[in-house]
Amino acid sequence: MSTLVRIFWRVFFLGLAALILLILGINFLGKLPSLKELENPSIMLASEVYADDGTSMGKYYKERGNRSNVDYKDISPNVINALVATEDSRFYEHSGIDGYAVMRAVLKFGHDGGGSTITQQLAKNMLGQGSKNIVLRFIEKLKEWITAIKLERNFTKQEIIALYLNAVPFGDNVYGIRNASRTFFQKEPDRVSVDEAAVLIGMLKGNTLYNPRKNPKMAIERRNTVINQMVKGNYVTEADAAKLKSRPIDLTNYKKMDETNGLAPYFRDVIRDELKKWCKEHKNPATGEPYNLYEDGLRIYTTINPRMQINAEEAVAKQIPILQRALSAQPSIRKGLVWKDHANTLEAAMKNSDRWHNLEDAGMDAADIRKTFFQPTEMRVFAWNARREKDTVMTPMDSIKYHQQMLETAFMAMDPITGAVKAWVGGIDFKTYKFDHVNINTKRQVGSSIKPFLYGMAIQDYGFTPETQCEATQQYFPKYKNYVPAKNSGRTGTRTMATGLAWSINEVAAYIMKQFGDDGPDHFADFLQQINIPTKVAPYPSLALGACELSLYEMMWGYTMFPSGGFSTKPYYISRIEDKNGNVLDRFDTKRKEVISPSTAYTMARMMQGPVDFGTAAGLRDRLGVAEMGGKTGTTNDNSDAWFMGYTPQLLAGVWIGCDDRFIHLEGGLGYGAQAARPIWEYFFAKTLADKTLGIDRNAHFVQPENMKNPQMYDYQNIIDKTAPPGAEGADQGNGRANQYLDTSAPKVPVDSRLNSEEEKVLKEANGGDKPSFKITVKDAQPTEEPKKKPGFFKRLFGGGKKDN
């Protein structure tokens, strides 16, 4: 008996020591989650971006953070039944640990399934466990058991299933049931069928091995195993199971969401940095730490309108391939002559490439790396086709040249009254070209698109009117070493200011600048600051012609004052930020400041109808069928930049086109703002106006100030000379080169005749199914003789105007 007692106490103390060691081991590996942590499980959750109608645009996530939580009620019973039948058939009977399953796993060495319950698997996910060491894994198991019991005490069975399905990894680096059902079947999780649910749950056993995209045969076998388990659990009948198992796995709708697809990828990438900054400045009350954009499941609601965004992307897809075809056909590009004096550019691009960095990291020396750039290599490059890519063979150096020779673009549309940004296209293809051309930091020379600011200042501060007579001759600025701004009109004499704007006459702009006095350039630079243009520009006479660099974002900000009655309205694009539970954390709204008088704004809005009626963008208003609008073209030296800015009373949009390297550019009239940029703007507005759900009224009018009420209408016939100045359609009188500033020349050869069949197919789709017709038609508004003049509305309203000096 004493021997038995001794054995008992030995076993007791040994067991007690083992228990103490286990507890110490558990604590050594990390503390168990507290009740508070269990009530607020910290599973990483991707932040999601939404359009103005609630449409999901995309997410911000790190590798394991691409999740979207979904409630139990929003998960199909088919998914839940498949999960329980396959992973834990006694789920509704145990309290976190299934003793029967544990004993079965031990006695049969796991051949009939493991012993982990769904609750234990959730605990494992939450604790981030999975050691390969047998001893450590045993200790981890104890922690999982304890955590599982805590979970069962504090959550319902339904909540545990939802937490589990929101956390588990599926194939293709997709996490959570919502992302999985969207990726593999383009369905919300509440609409998944029995066989689709079996495919998804089947992947939990091995998300690579049973991935239907990578291993279709094994995926079918695993799906059928899950269906058989559902039959055993009485969730599916034998007859239905037989039908389901005979079906193939349909992945027709497979589409993995990543940061290169979804709505407005350039826009989402730009606001990422702003959101990161916001997160640093705001603490998450649940953790006491700053919010994490990639893990805290924030909901970011933006002002982007999905229909307008699609219209903008279609407009780019319609126009840029035409221009690219023309650019690629130019001898300087085709023969590689454009690179003759730009070896440094190629050298820098080579050394900044991923290829160079990867080979450098692999230990290859610079000389050997350089050699690889001149060896033909199989590669995939950007192309204007349905996939936006093609497989080819070329040297890496030729690949650099090829990609640098692609025309880029920027497009932005916004409500000029509220400042809400409605569409944003930062380039031709985000997958290949990540650099955004819309944002405030990407600046290009603006050319004649700056002239409305100059004219607005002349009216606001110097008493000019649209009928003020301006000298159309070259101007001298002694203070600036007799600088003479480039001329673009062969006609001398005087022109009304309205005519100067309509035809973008440089001499008129220079004349106006000179009327501001010797310090005119300084005054104009200050005026740009006053109307909220953030960039501080250098004060030179050439500023009158747009010899400064501004971003499209800034140009849009500046142009808001014309249709909004004199108010500068800052473009904004985030309306509110919510936490993962829908609690509003921050709101954003309109920021406006009056910078010019309502009468100046109205005068400019009406005067800017000249370019789109008779001038450099002639016929645009007529083709769109709108009552009132304003617009302005812009082209810089050598056609390096083409601009078009335009607006109706309700909507403002701007377009820029050019290559990232300014020495690569279109030649001839096709590179002018009216021919390169204007078609994108026009296509966008035509589609947007035709969509009645967007509420953009063709018959809307600019608000006319009370002090300008007059029964007489704006009289274009009297104010604007509808005959294009000499040089508008021919060579510049000074140097024999095509005029760079008057955007009136149409292509001599129909551009669509240059398209290959593949490009024509893509553009046909963008055109709504019709064969693309890309001839640029400009209504001929040049009469053989000028009409007789009569006193115009602005003369009657303002008087004779400013006298010439």
Image (cartoon, grey):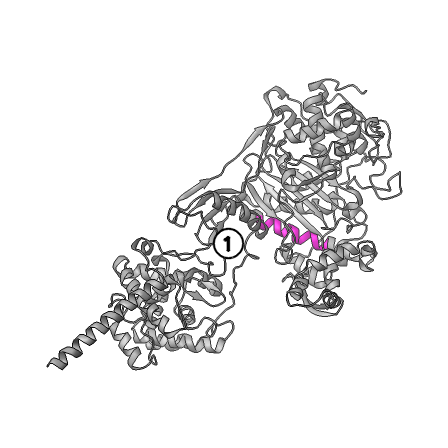
Taking the spot 33% from the left edge, 73% from the top edge, the residue there is 230
Q: Residue furthest left?
A: 1
Residue 753's x, y, as percent?
77, 57
Is 588 left or right of 783, judged from the image as shown? left
In this rendering, does residue 251 appear at all? yes
Q: Tell me: residue 456, above or below residue 692.
A: above
The amino acid marked with disc number 1 is Tyr
> Looking at the image, how many numbered discs can be counted on the residues?
1
Q: Nearer the viewer, residue 574 or 82?
A: 574
Between 647 and 95, the one lying in front of the other is: 95
In percent of width and height, residue 173 lies at: 49, 65
In the depicted view, which residue is nearer to us: 170 or 666? 170
Residue interval drawn in magenta: 309-322
Say if residue 618 shows up in the picture.
no
Q: Is residue 399 above or below residue 15?
A: above
Which quadrant, please, contains the C terminus?
top right
Q: Is residue 557 above or below residue 423?
A: above
Residue found 25% across the figure and 59% down from its top: 153
- Which quadrant, please, contains the N terminus? bottom left
The residue sitting at the top extreme is: 799
The local crowd at label 1, few if under 14, some if 14 to 19, many if 20 or more residues have their Cα within 10 Å, is: many
Most frequent secondary structure within the magenta stretch: helix
Which of the 4 image quarters holds residue 27?
A: bottom left
Residue highlighted by disc 1: 60
